[in-house]
């Protein structure tokens, strides 16, 4: 089944690895985030501003990073009543985010309100972020899902939430690399699939539970890879990023799944 088309214009997924790696700048201050961004500028194109950094540094950090050439993945994982989330989408557009997350578990009314808010911005000539619905956090496994009353496996829950969110018009999903092949099979090539839970071979899983290597994630059809600590906590972040990019590019050229 092909996913329903988003009412919003979809940006095509760029082919090169550099344009498909999102570095998660999970830092407690603008100074620390910018110090790393300065090392990566030119080599990486996407920066993720998540809750830790955004709450510490607000919209100015988005502007600073954009000024250094980064596109911004604003990972605020919105989950509130429809009216509040619609307002947050408008604020995120003003901040200059290109991708914005919201929790699929917020349900259809919330997701539709977000999509409509973004569509209104586009209709007025603005540039809204593409909306990505977070399915099941990559730090959750079946046991943890059971504790919050979800009896299904992570894969079943991802599929259920993913189908529902795409039917509401979001541009894509955040999921673990373990679910990408299944989602591509079910949803086709159209939706953006953004995968955290990326660990180069041999590196520590930390709190992530549903994982894959960068090459494996590209091979199964991920559109964008979100990588934090394997880069940000490396002794040589630029070298770590370049080696991930190399692995992604090698897989892409080897004929790995091509999303574009
Ligand atoms: O450090 P690490 O590579 O584990 O960082 C992954 C990033 O992806 C974090 O910034 C985290 O907030 C984000 N993320 C995630 N799982 C999701 C959605 C986002 O790990 N389902």
Image (cartoon, rainbow, N blue to C red):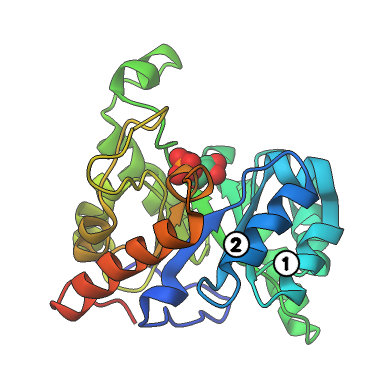
Query: Outermost residue toward the front?
Result: 235
Which residue position holds label 1?
65
| Side of 190 relative to 61 (left or right) | left
Task: Name the spot of residue 201 as percent of width and height, x first.
Answer: 23, 46
Q: CA distance from mark 1 to mark 2?
A: 8 Å
The C terminus appears in which quarter of the rendering? bottom left
Residue drawn at x 81%, y 68% is: 63
Task: Name the spot of residue 168 as percent of width and height, x first.
Answer: 52, 58
Nearer-N-terminus badge (1/2)? 2
Task: Name the spot of residue 160 as percent of width and height, x first.
Answer: 35, 43
Query: Outermost residue toward the top?
Result: 147
Q: Which mark is residue 47?
A: 2
User: Is residue 159 visible from the viewing direction of this image?
Assistant: yes
Q: Which mark is residue 126?
A: none
| Crowd around label 1: few <14 · some 14–19 · many ≥20 (10 Å) | many
- Asked if residue 4 is positioned above or below residue 138 in the image, the reply reads below
> Do labels 1 and 2 touch, CB within 8 Å?
yes
Q: Nearer the viewer, residue 62 or 126?
A: 62
Residue drawn at x 76%, y 60% is: 92
| Side of 206 relative to 25 (left or right) | left
């Amino acid at each position: 089944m092909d996913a329903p088309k988003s009412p919003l214009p979809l940006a095509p997924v760029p082919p090169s690895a550099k344009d498909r790696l999102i570095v998660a700048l999970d830092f407690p201050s603008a100074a620390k985030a910018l110090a790393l961004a300065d090392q990566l500028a030119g080599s990486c194109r996407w920066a993720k501003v998540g809750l830790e950094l955004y709450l510490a540094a607000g919209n100015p950090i988005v502007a600073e990073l954009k000024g250094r050439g980064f596109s911004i993945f604003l990972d605020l994982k919105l989950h509130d009543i429809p009216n509040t989330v619609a307002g947050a989408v408008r604020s995120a557009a003003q901040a200059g985010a290109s991708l914005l997350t919201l929790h699929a578990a917020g349900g259809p009314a919330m997701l539709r309100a977000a999509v409509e808010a973004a569509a209104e911005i586009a209709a007025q000539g603005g540039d809204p972020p593409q909306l990505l619905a977070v399915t099941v956090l990559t730090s959750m496994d079946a046991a943890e899902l059971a504790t919050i009353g979800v009896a299904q496996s992570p894969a079943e829950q991802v599929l259920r939430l993913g189908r529902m969110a795409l039917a509401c018009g979001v541009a894509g999903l955040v999921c673990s690399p373990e679910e990408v092949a299944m989602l591509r099979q079910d949803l086709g090539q159209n939706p953006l699939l953004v995968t955290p839970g990326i660990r180069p071979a041999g590196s520590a899983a930390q709190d992530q539970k549903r994982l894959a290597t960068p090459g494996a994630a590209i091979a199964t059809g991920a559109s964008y890879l979100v990588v934090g600590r394997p880069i940000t906590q490396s002794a040589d972040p630029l070298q770590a990023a370049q080696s991930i990019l190399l692995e992604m590019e090698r897989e892409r050229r080897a004929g790995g799944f091509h999303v574009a």
